[in-house]
Amino acid sequence: MSTPARGGTAALAPRDQPPGSRERLFGIGVAAARAGVSERALRYYQQLGLITPSGRTPGGLRRYSQDDLARVARIRQLQTLLGLNLDEIAVVLRNEDRLAEIRLAYHRQLTSDADRRELLRESLTLQQDLRVTVEAKRSAIEGFLADLDARIARTRSLL
């Protein structure tokens, strides 16, 4: 199989897929452009364990799937919307990944009622932890706004 040019697309079988299965994977340049980040950011996210490329070429070049790009979009959302730093994002993503695993385990036919209750308890704890993270950011924003409102009021009083 020939290797596409750096940043191109390829139909390679990504990790964790049956042999012969094909999904369109993107080189780092195309993936970065589609995700709206730099190639360096993608490499850094991988270095931090936030994302894992879905495949590699025989030469070792990274290949990204649509799911990988969706995860990058989630990282950017958590950065821009909530103002989370990358360490906080890592915790959120780990919790979200675990919640997805819990959902799958909960719906397995072999799961007992006791196991389901334990899964629900863990899910509740993870969701509460995520809420604490978001609440901390909200409180910080409210404090910033209160300070800004006070400065605006002082400036108006000087006028």
Image: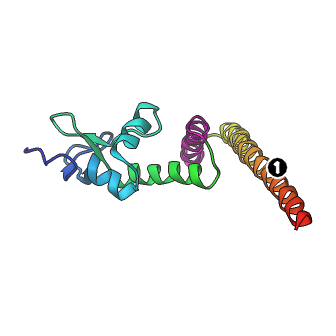
Instruction: Give, as a single range, the part of the protein colored magenta.
Output: 85-110
Magenta-drawn stretch contains 103: yes
The residue depicted at 73 percent of the width and 43 percent of the height is: 124
Answer above or below: position of 150 versus 49: below
Q: Callout 1: helix, strand or loop? A: helix
Task: Choose top left, top right, bottom left or bottom right for residue 45.
Answer: top left
Q: Which residue is mark 1?
A: 143
The residue depicted at 60 percent of the width and 36 percent of the height is: 91
Magenta-drawn stretch contains 129: no
Amino acid beneath label 1:
Gly
At which x and y percent is residue 129? 72, 40
Using residue 18 as the reference point, say whether residue 139 is left or right of it. right
| Relative depth, front residue between 26 and 147 | 147
The residue depicted at 23 percent of the width and 50 percent of the height is: 21
Residue occupying the far right of the picture: 157
Residue occupying the far front of the picture: 159
| Relative depth, front residue between 68 and 75 | 75
